[in-house]
Amino acid sequence: MTYDVGADVAVTVVMPTYNEAANLPRMAEAVLQLPLRGLHLKIVDDSSPDGTGRIAEELAEKYNWDGVRRMSVLHRTEKDGLGRAYVAGMSAAVDEGAQYVVQMDADGSHPVEAVPRMLGTAVASGVGLVIGSRYVEGGQLDDDWGAHRVLLSRFANRYARTVLGTKIRDITAGFNLWSAQTLRDVDLHSLDSAGYSFQVELKFKAVRAGHSAVEIPIRFEERTEGVSKMTLRTQLESAVVPVKLRLKHKQ
Protein backbone atom coordinates (compact mmCIF):
# COMPACT_ATOMS: atom_id res chain seq x y z
CA MET A 1 0.00 0.00 0.00
CA THR A 2 1.28 3.48 -0.87
CA TYR A 3 0.54 6.58 1.18
CA ASP A 4 0.91 10.20 0.15
CA VAL A 5 2.47 11.77 3.21
CA GLY A 6 2.45 15.22 1.64
CA ALA A 7 4.98 18.03 1.82
CA ASP A 8 4.02 19.42 5.20
CA VAL A 9 5.08 16.50 7.41
CA ALA A 10 8.29 17.42 9.24
CA VAL A 11 10.33 14.27 9.87
CA THR A 12 13.87 14.15 11.25
CA VAL A 13 16.14 11.14 10.84
CA VAL A 14 18.44 10.96 13.87
CA MET A 15 21.64 9.06 13.14
CA PRO A 16 24.22 8.57 15.92
CA THR A 17 27.81 8.10 14.75
CA TYR A 18 31.07 6.92 16.20
CA ASN A 19 33.87 6.13 13.73
CA GLU A 20 31.55 5.91 10.74
CA ALA A 21 33.65 7.98 8.32
CA ALA A 22 33.52 5.23 5.68
CA ASN A 23 29.73 4.92 5.82
CA LEU A 24 28.41 8.42 6.46
CA PRO A 25 28.71 10.01 2.97
CA ARG A 26 26.68 7.31 1.22
CA MET A 27 24.16 7.13 4.08
CA ALA A 28 23.61 10.90 4.07
CA GLU A 29 23.13 10.88 0.30
CA ALA A 30 20.66 7.99 0.47
CA VAL A 31 18.58 9.62 3.23
CA LEU A 32 18.51 13.07 1.65
CA GLN A 33 17.47 11.65 -1.73
CA LEU A 34 14.25 10.27 -0.27
CA PRO A 35 11.10 11.80 -1.82
CA LEU A 36 10.10 13.55 1.43
CA ARG A 37 10.24 17.32 1.22
CA GLY A 38 9.87 17.75 4.96
CA LEU A 39 12.89 15.54 5.71
CA HIS A 40 15.85 16.58 7.85
CA LEU A 41 18.93 14.52 8.75
CA LYS A 42 20.52 15.07 12.16
CA ILE A 43 23.90 13.45 12.85
CA VAL A 44 24.85 12.96 16.51
CA ASP A 45 28.58 12.41 16.66
CA ASP A 46 30.39 11.32 19.83
CA SER A 47 33.75 12.95 19.04
CA SER A 48 34.77 10.21 16.61
CA PRO A 49 38.57 10.01 16.36
CA ASP A 50 38.33 9.00 12.68
CA GLY A 51 36.97 12.41 11.66
CA THR A 52 33.30 11.47 11.26
CA GLY A 53 32.23 14.76 12.87
CA ARG A 54 34.27 16.82 10.40
CA ILE A 55 32.88 14.83 7.47
CA ALA A 56 29.36 15.38 8.80
CA GLU A 57 29.91 19.14 8.87
CA GLU A 58 31.23 19.07 5.29
CA LEU A 59 28.18 17.11 4.17
CA ALA A 60 25.85 19.55 5.94
CA GLU A 61 27.51 22.41 4.09
CA LYS A 62 27.04 20.50 0.84
CA TYR A 63 23.36 19.69 1.35
CA ASN A 64 22.23 22.94 3.02
CA TRP A 65 21.73 25.36 0.18
CA ASP A 66 19.31 28.03 -0.97
CA GLY A 67 18.34 28.76 2.62
CA VAL A 68 17.06 25.23 3.21
CA ARG A 69 18.56 23.46 6.24
CA ARG A 70 18.34 19.78 5.31
CA MET A 71 21.10 18.44 7.56
CA SER A 72 22.57 19.34 10.93
CA VAL A 73 25.27 17.98 13.22
CA LEU A 74 25.15 17.65 16.99
CA HIS A 75 28.64 17.20 18.47
CA ARG A 76 28.93 15.48 21.84
CA THR A 77 32.11 15.60 23.87
CA GLU A 78 32.02 12.05 25.19
CA LYS A 79 31.03 8.54 24.15
CA ASP A 80 28.61 7.44 26.86
CA GLY A 81 26.29 5.10 25.04
CA LEU A 82 23.93 4.82 22.10
CA GLY A 83 20.93 5.60 24.28
CA ARG A 84 22.38 8.88 25.48
CA ALA A 85 23.21 9.88 21.91
CA TYR A 86 19.66 9.16 20.82
CA VAL A 87 18.17 11.11 23.72
CA ALA A 88 20.26 14.14 22.73
CA GLY A 89 19.40 13.92 19.04
CA MET A 90 15.72 13.03 19.37
CA SER A 91 15.13 15.72 22.01
CA ALA A 92 16.74 18.32 19.76
CA ALA A 93 14.63 17.15 16.80
CA VAL A 94 11.37 17.52 18.74
CA ASP A 95 12.43 20.93 20.10
CA GLU A 96 13.13 22.02 16.51
CA GLY A 97 9.60 21.14 15.41
CA ALA A 98 9.82 17.61 14.02
CA GLN A 99 6.42 15.90 13.89
CA TYR A 100 8.05 12.50 13.52
CA VAL A 101 11.52 11.24 14.43
CA VAL A 102 13.26 8.24 12.85
CA GLN A 103 16.02 6.26 14.55
CA MET A 104 18.52 4.90 12.02
CA ASP A 105 21.97 3.31 12.22
CA ALA A 106 24.79 4.87 10.21
CA ASP A 107 26.25 1.52 9.11
CA GLY A 108 23.77 0.77 6.33
CA SER A 109 22.00 -2.05 8.16
CA HIS A 110 18.63 -0.29 8.02
CA PRO A 111 16.94 0.06 4.59
CA VAL A 112 16.67 3.78 3.87
CA GLU A 113 13.94 3.16 1.30
CA ALA A 114 11.60 1.96 4.07
CA VAL A 115 11.38 5.41 5.70
CA PRO A 116 8.54 6.74 3.46
CA ARG A 117 6.57 3.55 4.11
CA MET A 118 7.07 3.92 7.87
CA LEU A 119 6.04 7.57 7.77
CA GLY A 120 3.03 6.84 5.59
CA THR A 121 1.93 4.11 7.97
CA ALA A 122 2.17 6.44 10.96
CA VAL A 123 0.30 9.28 9.26
CA ALA A 124 -2.44 6.99 7.89
CA SER A 125 -3.00 5.00 11.08
CA GLY A 126 -2.28 7.59 13.76
CA VAL A 127 -0.04 5.23 15.76
CA GLY A 128 2.74 6.65 17.90
CA LEU A 129 5.38 4.14 16.84
CA VAL A 130 6.25 2.27 13.65
CA ILE A 131 8.93 -0.41 13.95
CA GLY A 132 11.08 -1.66 11.09
CA SER A 133 10.82 -5.27 12.17
CA ARG A 134 13.00 -8.27 11.42
CA TYR A 135 10.62 -10.69 13.10
CA VAL A 136 7.18 -10.15 11.61
CA GLU A 137 6.07 -11.97 8.46
CA GLY A 138 8.21 -10.76 5.56
CA GLY A 139 11.06 -9.55 7.78
CA GLN A 140 14.56 -10.83 7.00
CA LEU A 141 18.10 -10.96 8.32
CA ASP A 142 21.16 -10.69 6.09
CA ASP A 143 22.37 -14.05 4.80
CA ASP A 144 25.83 -13.26 6.22
CA TRP A 145 24.50 -13.46 9.77
CA GLY A 146 25.76 -16.68 11.32
CA ALA A 147 23.49 -19.13 13.12
CA HIS A 148 24.90 -17.98 16.49
CA ARG A 149 23.99 -14.32 15.89
CA VAL A 150 20.53 -15.22 14.61
CA LEU A 151 19.83 -17.36 17.66
CA LEU A 152 21.19 -14.71 20.02
CA SER A 153 19.07 -11.98 18.43
CA ARG A 154 15.91 -14.08 18.47
CA PHE A 155 16.56 -15.12 22.07
CA ALA A 156 17.09 -11.50 23.16
CA ASN A 157 13.75 -10.51 21.66
CA ARG A 158 11.88 -13.47 23.13
CA TYR A 159 13.50 -12.87 26.53
CA ALA A 160 12.57 -9.16 26.61
CA ARG A 161 9.03 -9.85 25.34
CA THR A 162 8.47 -12.53 27.95
CA VAL A 163 9.84 -10.51 30.87
CA LEU A 164 7.91 -7.37 29.91
CA GLY A 165 4.73 -9.07 28.72
CA THR A 166 4.65 -7.21 25.41
CA LYS A 167 3.35 -8.33 22.01
CA ILE A 168 5.99 -6.38 20.06
CA ARG A 169 7.87 -9.00 18.06
CA ASP A 170 11.05 -6.98 17.49
CA ILE A 171 11.29 -5.00 20.72
CA THR A 172 15.10 -4.71 20.37
CA ALA A 173 14.80 -3.12 16.89
CA GLY A 174 16.85 0.00 16.30
CA PHE A 175 14.98 1.20 13.20
CA ASN A 176 11.93 3.03 14.52
CA LEU A 177 9.71 6.00 13.69
CA TRP A 178 8.12 7.93 16.55
CA SER A 179 5.54 10.67 16.69
CA ALA A 180 6.73 13.75 18.54
CA GLN A 181 3.79 13.44 20.92
CA THR A 182 4.84 9.92 21.91
CA LEU A 183 8.34 11.11 22.71
CA ARG A 184 6.97 13.99 24.78
CA ASP A 185 4.71 11.66 26.72
CA VAL A 186 7.55 9.27 27.49
CA ASP A 187 9.97 12.07 28.46
CA LEU A 188 13.23 11.00 26.88
CA HIS A 189 15.32 12.44 29.69
CA SER A 190 13.63 10.11 32.18
CA LEU A 191 15.07 7.00 30.48
CA ASP A 192 17.72 5.09 32.40
CA SER A 193 19.32 3.00 29.65
CA ALA A 194 22.60 4.22 28.23
CA GLY A 195 23.27 1.47 25.67
CA TYR A 196 21.32 -0.68 23.23
CA SER A 197 18.68 -1.51 25.85
CA PHE A 198 17.42 2.04 25.26
CA GLN A 199 15.48 0.50 22.36
CA VAL A 200 13.59 -1.81 24.73
CA GLU A 201 12.97 0.75 27.46
CA LEU A 202 11.61 3.41 25.13
CA LYS A 203 9.17 1.02 23.42
CA PHE A 204 8.01 -0.41 26.74
CA LYS A 205 7.34 3.02 28.23
CA ALA A 206 5.63 4.28 25.06
CA VAL A 207 3.15 1.40 25.14
CA ARG A 208 2.58 1.92 28.87
CA ALA A 209 1.83 5.57 28.12
CA GLY A 210 -1.01 4.42 25.86
CA HIS A 211 0.59 4.61 22.42
CA SER A 212 0.08 1.88 19.84
CA ALA A 213 2.88 0.29 17.83
CA VAL A 214 2.81 -1.15 14.30
CA GLU A 215 5.57 -3.39 12.93
CA ILE A 216 6.36 -3.46 9.23
CA PRO A 217 8.79 -5.99 7.73
CA ILE A 218 12.30 -4.96 6.71
CA ARG A 219 15.46 -6.72 5.60
CA PHE A 220 18.29 -6.08 8.06
CA GLU A 221 21.65 -5.93 6.27
CA GLU A 222 25.12 -6.62 7.59
CA ARG A 223 27.44 -3.62 7.72
CA THR A 224 30.07 -3.54 4.95
CA GLU A 225 32.41 -0.97 6.52
CA GLY A 226 33.64 -0.43 10.08
CA VAL A 227 33.06 -2.57 13.15
CA SER A 228 30.08 -3.23 15.42
CA LYS A 229 29.82 -1.17 18.63
CA MET A 230 28.17 -4.02 20.55
CA THR A 231 30.22 -4.96 23.63
CA LEU A 232 29.87 -7.42 26.49
CA ARG A 233 28.86 -4.54 28.75
CA THR A 234 25.98 -3.54 26.47
CA GLN A 235 24.86 -7.16 26.19
CA LEU A 236 24.77 -7.47 29.98
CA GLU A 237 22.83 -4.21 30.27
CA SER A 238 20.34 -5.53 27.72
CA ALA A 239 19.77 -8.60 29.88
CA VAL A 240 19.28 -6.65 33.12
CA VAL A 241 17.12 -3.75 31.91
CA PRO A 242 13.93 -5.75 31.12
CA VAL A 243 13.99 -7.22 34.64
CA LYS A 244 14.46 -3.76 36.18
CA LEU A 245 11.60 -2.36 34.11
CA ARG A 246 9.30 -5.20 35.08
CA LEU A 247 10.07 -4.81 38.79
CA LYS A 248 9.63 -1.05 38.61
CA HIS A 249 6.30 -1.30 36.78
CA LYS A 250 4.66 -4.34 38.33
CA GLN A 251 1.09 -3.38 37.58
Image: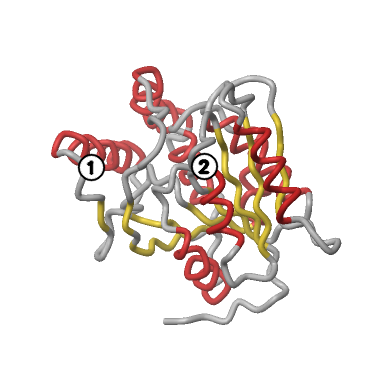
Q: Residues within 10 Å of mark 2 (few under 14, many from 20)?
A: many
Mark 2–mark 1 CB contact (< 8 Å): no
Q: Quadrant of the C terminus?
A: top left
Please report the residue visible at 30 percent of the width from the left and 54 percent of the height from the top. 134
Q: Say which element carries label 2.
A: helix
Examine the rendered structure and indicate whether residue 231 appears above or below residue 58.
above
Say which quarter of the image contains residue 222.
top left
The amino acid pointed to by label 2 is: Leu
x and y, in percent, of residue 14 in the image: 60, 47
Please report the residue visible at 45 percent of the width from the left and 64 percent of the height from the top. 114
Horizontal side of residue 17 vs 114, given as left or right = right
Q: Say which element carries label 1.
A: helix
x and y, in percent, of residue 203 in the image: 47, 46
x and y, in percent, of residue 184 in the image: 68, 48
Q: Residues within 10 Å of mark 1 (few under 14, many from 20)?
A: some
Checking the image for residue 209, the label placed there is none
Q: Find disc 1 in the rendering and name its residue.
A: 154
The amino acid pointed to by label 1 is: Arg
Please report the residue visible at 53 percent of the width from the left and 59 percent of the height from the top. 30
Please report the residue visible at 71 percent of the width from the left and 52 percent of the height from the top. 71
Q: Nearer the viewer, residue 186 or 81?
A: 81
Say which quarter of the image contains residue 32.
bottom right
Residue closest to the far right: 67
Q: Quadrant of the N terminus?
A: bottom left
x and y, in percent, of residue 230 in the image: 38, 27
Checking the image for residue 202, the label placed there is 2
